[in-house]
Image (spheres, rainbow, N blue to C red):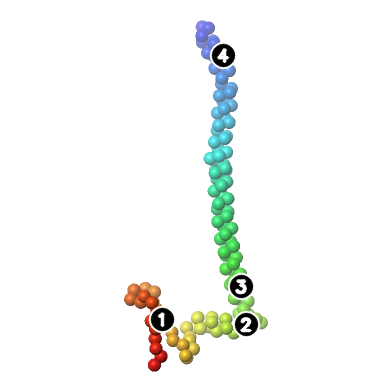
């Protein structure tokens, strides 16, 4: 009987620290590996940096487009830009220009050909 009582006493003395260490290990693991842990924080910071770079690219593109739109307004109309857009949209060219139309899906065309004016 003395041995069983001794085991119960020692188990009672060990149970508190073992449970405490288990709780500490559990929380330490989730602080590093969990959904909101240190590794997830590093991953989120990387995503934030990537998205911030993408935002800067989009802002630059938007700035360029706004500048072009501003140049097309009647009060600040740039004749060169107007001509460029009209020729691009309508497919017109000047009488002294040669227009070479290449189809990108045609494998026989590998480079632009040099034409001589008749």
Depth-wise, is mark 1 or mark 4 nearer the camera? 1
- As measured in the structure, the alpha-carbon distance from the residue carrying label 1 to the one carrying label 2 is 30 Å
Residue on which disc 1 sits: 101
- As measured in the structure, the alpha-carbon distance from the residue carrying label 3 to the one carrying label 2 is 14 Å
Q: Residue furthest right?
A: 75
- As measured in the structure, the alpha-carbon distance from the residue carrying label 1 to the one carrying label 4 is 94 Å
Residue on which disc 2 sits: 77
Q: Residue furthest left?
A: 108
Image vertical order of residue 13 relative to residue 26, above or below:
above
Image vertical order of residue 6 relative to residue 20, above or below:
above
Q: Residue furthest top?
A: 1
- As measured in the structure, the alpha-carbon distance from the residue carrying label 3 to the one carrying label 1 is 30 Å
Residue on which disc 3 sits: 66
SS under mark 4: helix
SS under mark 3: helix
Q: How many marks?
A: 4
Task: Return the residue nearer the eye: 112 or 5.
Answer: 112
- Seen at 54% across and 36% down, the residue is 29
Q: Is residue 111 left or right of residue 10?
A: left
Comes first in the chain, label 3 or label 1? 3
Q: Residues within 10 Å of mark 1 (few under 14, many from 20)?
A: few
Comes first in the chain, label 3 or label 2? 3
Task: Return the residue nearer the eye: 108 or 44.
Answer: 108
Q: Residues within 10 Å of mark 4 (few under 14, many from 20)?
A: few
> Badges 2 and 4: C-beta atoms under 8 Å apart?
no
Q: Residues within 10 Å of mark 2 (few under 14, many from 20)?
A: some
Q: Position of residue 87 (x, y in %)?
A: 51, 83
SS under mark 2: loop
Comes first in the chain, label 2 or label 4? 4
Q: Position of residue 68 (x, y in %)?
A: 59, 76
């Amino acid at each position: 009987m003395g041995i069983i009582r001794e085991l119960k006493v020692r188990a009672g003395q060990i149970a508190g620290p073992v449970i405490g260490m288990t709780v500490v290990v559990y929380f330490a693991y989730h602080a590093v590996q969990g959904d909101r842990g240190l590794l997830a924080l590093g991953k989120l910071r990387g995503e934030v940096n990537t998205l911030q770079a993408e935002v800067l690219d989009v802002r630059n593109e938007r700035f360029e487009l706004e500048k072009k739109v501003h140049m097309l307004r009647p009060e600040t109309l740039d004749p060169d830009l107007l001509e460029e857009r009209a020729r691009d949209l309508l497919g017109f060219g000047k009488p002294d220009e040669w227009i070479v139309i290449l189809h990108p899906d045609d494998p026989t065309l590998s480079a632009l050909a040099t034409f001589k004016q008749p």
